[in-house]
Amino acid sequence: MDMSPAVEVVEVGPRDGLQNEIVVLPTARKVELVNRAVEAGVRRVEAVSFVHPRRVPQMADAEAVMAALPRRDDVRYIGLVLNERGLDRALAAGVDEVNVVVVASDTFGRRNQGTTTDEGVAVWSRIAGRAREAGLRAGVTIAAAFGCPFEGTVPAERISEVAARVAEAGPSEIALADTIGVGVPTQVTDRLARVRAVAPGVPLRCHFHNTRNTGYANAVAALTAGVTTLDASVGGIGGCPFAPAATGNIATEDLTYLLDGMGVASGLSSEALARLGTWVGEQLGKPVPALLGRAGPFPG
Amino acid sequence: MDMSPAVEVVEVGPRDGLQNEIVVLPTARKVELVNRAVEAGVRRVEAVSFVHPRRVPQMADAEAVMAALPRRDDVRYIGLVLNERGLDRALAAGVDEVNVVVVASDTFGRRNQGTTTDEGVAVWSRIAGRAREAGLRAGVTIAAAFGCPFEGTVPAERISEVAARVAEAGPSEIALADTIGVGVPTQVTDRLARVRAVAPGVPLRCHFHNTRNTGYANAVAALTAGVTTLDASVGGIGGCPFAPAATGNIATEDLTYLLDGMGVASGLSSEALARLGTWVGEQLGKPVPALLGRAGPFPG
């Protein structure tokens, strides 16, 4: 079982994790979440999204969160943007990089952000151009890269095609997102190979949800396929307001346990993250899907 | 990603799944559970254990369950036994095969069944001999094959040694059990190779718990290592009365979803199993850990 000796875990809890939660956390709590994640070793955080506050109320304080986050040379904050208005806000807020979502299925794209895939690619290209002019790193996420809650399985050929088109604008990274947690390891291997073929040299990142208990197996498949950047959310919280029954991201603490056991360095403390996951559950008033905090210490 | 085109899933819910539950199901409900699993495609069931009713009250009606189960030529019922008294009961009850547990760590072995590993191997050898005389298939499970709740990580060398010794008695199958859900895929690959090396030709089976969210990734690792028999419990219920914080087996319905997605035939219906998992939760008065029933149908 061959994989990189080290991986980067992007903490997406503050954005993808929280966005679907009805309990809106005060800005100070969000900042505390990011700070504690950084203390636990996280060095790249999807901190906020610049979307319309009526669409995603949890993200209404994105500017305030960004203003309150301590800046460190070794920590990068990502802001998710879906349109040029979002980019303007991200630039003003001083994010370290922007991530743009292009949805691989038209139906979900329209519901999620009001664009078909074609329109999403066009928006991404304009944002990528403007980000480049501004000297800002811009990556792109292909969402619903395995399945769409409305259209079903998204064909692998569709992912190749979308990846080829988003690659034209020169992304700093392409992420494949299993937004609704329907993918399986063989698909991960296959789709990553296809994306590599049409976007050679572009760093790849994977984003898995554990909706059907395939998320961690998919993460291992991505690692064995050579991916070295994985998204996770502390506590395993998450979902998508515009995808029915979508549930949490893979949990940062459980992913860290898995990586530690396989001897893959991440720089993260699974113990600190498990405590943070429990804290997140307390803030949200419900148990989190992560299991490490419940399993308790193992004297291994 | 190479794996067998077909696997056998052993439904262990009626035994390993239920044994740790405080709610004792009536015999008729246990029989219904088995019947519905068989209707969903299961062809091999760990139906009961023949242990002391004071130690595991849930299994006190093992004989009654076996007597009530419909017999079919294409369905095999396993009875778990820990000593010769258990074998006597299993023989009288007419099981199709017995499974004997040898614990790879002394501390857990003493707590679980009152024997050290050495003593467990000796018990297994006697049972294997008597089962052979009786014309009964006898397999052996190496429990705590990745970690012990009291001693921590169990060294891989220890597993090779135990496997070599249990192989001497001619098991029909050797199962590696991650009783407390601490293993990771690289360990699965390594330990399976070690067991194969010391027990060439003996069919292998794997038994994973999802205590720390590594269970399904471990299942995929076992499949890619050539294992074609996996344990799972419908609903993902389970645990061990003698291992603190041990939680559920991998869920049969979620495993089936994973196998279906990878094109691995199991003969199981994930939809029927997801409904059965929900039913199990209703019987136990709590939600089950399986996720497929919660995620709902995917139009994939």
Image: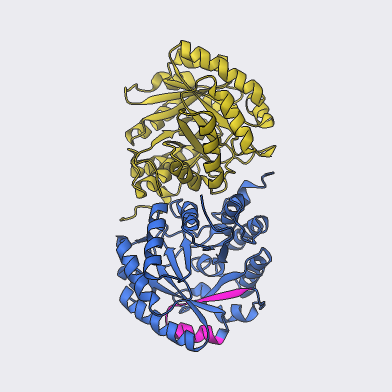
Chain colours: A blue, B yellow
Res A5 quadrant in image: bottom right
In the image, residue A114 lies at what x, y percent?
A: 35, 76
Give the answer, above or below, for where B143 lies relative to B236. Answer: above
- Who's the residue at 66% across and 45% down the image? A298
On whether residue A227 falls in the magenta region, the answer is no
In the image, residue B197 lies at what x, y percent?
A: 53, 33
Q: Is residue B240 visible?
A: yes
Please count the marks in the image: 0
Res A69 quadrant in image: bottom right
**Residue toward you, B262 or A265:** A265
- Who's the residue at 44% across and 42% down the image? B223
On whether residue A90 falls in the magenta region, the answer is yes
Highlighted range, magenta: A75-92
**Residue toward you, A99 or A112:** A99
- Who's the residue at 62% across and 22% down the image? B120
In the image, residue B220 lies at what x, y percent?
A: 45, 46
In the image, residue A281 lies at what x, y percent?
A: 59, 59
Going by the picture, which residue comes out furthest to the bottom? A133
Q: Is residue A154 visible?
A: no
Going by the picture, which residue comes out furthest to the top? B133
**Residue toward you, A174 or B112:** A174
Quarter of the image with the C terminus of chain A is: top right
Res A266 quadrant in image: bottom right
Give the answer, above or below, for where A97 lies relative to A268. Answer: below
B214 on left or right of B119: left
